[in-house]
Amino acid sequence: MITLNEKPVVKAEMLIRKPVEEVYEAFINPEITTKFWFTKSSGRLEKGKTIRWDWEMYGVGDELTVKELEHNKVIRIEWSNGTQVEWVFTFRKDNETFVSITNSGFSGTGDEMAAQAIDSMGGYTMVLCGLKALLEHNVMLNLVSDKAPDAHVN
């Protein structure tokens, strides 16, 4: 059994060689996001709105509430389980954007929070890798779907 002094906070980061406007749009516009992360969305991210994202191949989905949108700079959401996610988009030279995703608010026992944090770290890292391939090379890697092909419901 793991005893934690503090709740874990997960951070995944990646340099995307595209303008910040394009990278930010990829996360708020489900027509783009469905190409590298979830398969279905109830709509575009808008402050105060509750959105549903589905991963149809796994038969799962979740609702999130958009807490804050700062155009081309920050996205903050809260998942139905109370965990929070923050995306920070930092403009770099020559049409480069540094994306930092922070996930916090895990709950449960120390073991459960550690497992959630590890899973989250892997998941957000995959999402950033998929985004990078899509935006920089126009390649859909199917990372999320291929992570657990035996768990597909169809």
Image: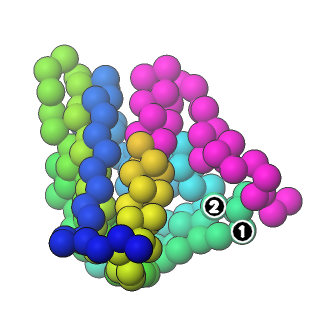
Task: Please name the amino acid that badge 2 sits on.
Answer: Trp
Is residue 73 depicted above or below 42 in this figure?
A: above
Quadrant where the N terminus sits is bottom left
Rendering coords of residue 31 (x, y %): 53, 49
Instruction: Indicate left or right for 25 with 70 as reference.
Output: right
Q: Foreground: 101 or 21?
A: 101
- How many marks the image carries: the answer is 2
Q: What is the image's colouring?
A: rainbow
Rendering coords of residue 85 (x, y %): 30, 63
CA gap, disc 2 and disc 1: 6 Å
Mark 2 nearby-residue class (10 Å; few <14, some 14–19, many ≥20) = some
- Whether the magenta-drawn stretch holds residue 47 is answered as no
Task: Please name the amino acid that badge 1 sits on.
Answer: Gly
- Does residue 103 show up? yes
- Residue drawn 43% across the image and 66% down it: 116
User: Which residues make up the magenta segment?
Assistant: 126-154
